[in-house]
Image (cartoon, rainbow, N blue to C red):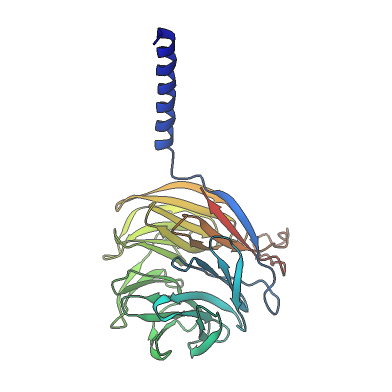
Amino acid sequence: MKRSGFVRLAVGFFVLLLGACALAFQPVGGYHLLKKVAIGAAEGGGEYFDYIAFDAAARRVYISHGTEVKVLDADSSAAVGAIAGLKRDHGIAIVAELGRGFISDGDAGEAVIFDLQTLKPIGRVKADDDADSILYDPASKRIFVFNGRPNSATVIDPATGAVVATLPLGGAPEQAVADGKGMIYDNLEDKNEVIAIDSRTLKIAARWPVAPVGQPVSIAMDRVSRRLFIAGRNPRLLVMMDADSGKIVGPSFPIGGRVDTNVFDPETGLVVASTGDGAIHIFHEDSPGKLSAVETVQTEYGAKTMALDPKTHNLLVDTADFDPPNPQQPNAQRRPKPGTFHLLIYGR
């Protein structure tokens, strides 16, 4: 080989090496809008929306939309169907082994049972007024419906549809998370604390203050490191908490207004909070003792509820088009325009 050819080869190899190193040390951020999916008006009109539930096994997305729950194919974003005839739905819980789903209907004060295949309602269970957050706990094999204004949780046997118990919580519950071993953690928004509920004995095992966070609303969990990620609206902060001691670990991080959902991605170590002022705040759990800020992604006003696709690591938020802000009342909540509801999918 001639010397000039050898030099060119060496230089080319060096450039490739630099490129590989650059890719290896890129930050874990870089989320951007991949797709906008129009969903349209709900039965009966209006544009109220709340939780998004992701069924990873069936590759389906369940989207709360006022009087209905829209169901989309997670890979194509095509509409699969809808569960209709609701009053004001909030959350969706999936019990795959029973082929059933459960929807919390706040205005009806009940949980609606539907068939996962046909999407037809097959039963209704009396909960309480303002039935809001809902989850399935795999350890106790029970459904927990968290009722906001009554400050309670309705516990349901998903196999029979029977109410097992009504558990007083001592405060207004919001988003909840289960550790898979028999403990459920829920924010009490008006008490500035998180409670730990034993899902088998139905006893409150602990109450922990979440300061410096105030008005805690959203929560997610790393089940391996036993860390809770809690975000609040006043002050607007996110913190990491030890799920066994209730101790706040590390510093707090500022976030936007009207946070409503947190998610944790166990494969990437990312902790994400979505806020109604139009921002997704992304952090990384560097270790059980350290959380660091990665990036803030601008979305749209109102996009405060979110789900994680564990296969693609995409983030799904939903919102609608809103009236412009009122200069005389800049802090007033803006009104969504009917028929403009849509899903936004962000990925890297």
Q: Residue at x 57, y 78 (%)?
A: 89
Residue at horizontal 60%, vertical 58%?
A: 344
- Taking the view exactly as shown, the residue that stands out farthest to the top is 3
Residue located farthest toward the front when viewing the structure as drawn: 1
- Whether 230 is drawn above or below 4: the answer is below
Looking at the rendered image, the quarter that the N terminus falls into is: top left
Q: Position of residue 29 (x, y in %)?
A: 47, 45
336 sits left or right of 235 in the view: right
Identified at 51% across, 44% down, the residue is: 30
Q: Nearer the viewer, residue 18 or 178?
A: 18
Residue 168, by quadrant, is bottom left
Residue 290 image point, x, y percent: 33, 49
Q: Is residue 16 left or right of residue 206?
A: right
Residue 134 visible in the shown view: no
The answer to whether residue 15 is above or below residue 32 is above
With respect to residue 293, does 63 lie above or below?
below
Whether residue 269 can be seen here: yes
State left or right for residue 130 relative to residue 45: left
